[in-house]
Image: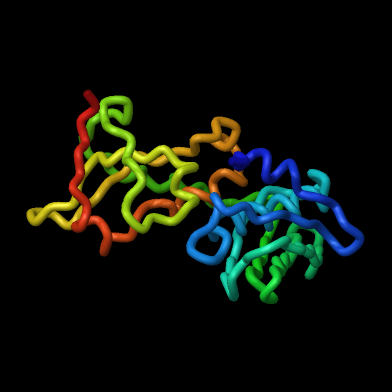
Amino acid sequence: MPSFSSLLSGLEKTESGYRATVFEDWLQGRTLYGGLSTALSYEAVRQSLDGATPPLRSAQIAFIGPASGDLAIKVTPLRQGRSVHFLSVDVVGEKGLATRATFCFGAARGSSLTLDPPAMPDVPDVPAPENLLDIPPLPGAPNFIKHFDMRLAIPPGKEKAAVLFWVRHRDIKAHQSVEGFWRWPTACPPPSLLPKVKWSRSAP
């Protein structure tokens, strides 16, 4: 079972771009998990620029078709100015174009305005993750879920429409990386599935 870090480090340089292999335990149905497709796209950009770029400012990701088989990843520079750099990435699988991503990198600019950063949202008072059970594989859950450590902090209920998970990578090397960030936002089960599961939160 290849880890997230090993998949990124195994990205192979080719004459036209990069190549990656899809492993079954990273699938979401018949396609590669979208968070990993995004991470591979970003990693291809990072390697092609070799660190010579300002910070990432925005990203647009379109999942167009199934990402299956060996993947060909092509990075295309769109425009580079004095402070902003746009690049496009196409991920092509055995069934054609699978993912198209656009990344924008931009240097910081000085300003005469001083704005306070937005306040952090209130965090509910919930048990610490070490006091909660790791969620076991759910019936019909996609393969990639096994690469995440998930703990249910607030279970679904009738009184309040709120569900809260603790989620982190099982691969420790992914905890502090930008590539690792792309993976976890869509890892949680969809709300429609939650009422069908008998939850148990407390660790023994």
Q: Is 55 positioned to the left or the right of 81 in the image?
A: left
Tell me the residue at 71%/69% (across/down).
92
x and y percentages locating residue 164 in the rendered image = 27, 46
Tell me the residue at 78%/63% (across/down).
75
- Colour mapping used in the image: rainbow
Using the image, determine if residue 147 lies above or below residue 162: above
Using the image, determine if residue 175 lies above or below residue 40: above
**Image quadrant where residue 103 sits:** bottom right
Q: Which quadrant holds the N terminus?
A: top right
x and y percentages locating residue 116 in the rendered image = 44, 45
Q: Is 37 positioned to the left or the right of 114 in the image?
A: right
Tell me the residue at 45%/52% (across/down).
185
Find the residue positioned furthest to the left. 159
Find the residue positioned furthest to the right. 15
Q: Between 63 and 60, which is closer to the camera in this rendering?
A: 63
Q: Which quadrant holds the C terminus?
A: top left
x and y percentages locating residue 79 in the rendered image = 79, 68
Q: Between 27 and 173, which is closer to the camera in this rendering?
A: 27
Tell me the residue at 57%/44% (across/down).
180
Using the image, determine if residue 58 lies above or below residue 181: below
The total number of labels drawn is 0
x and y percentages locating residue 182 in the rendered image = 55, 51
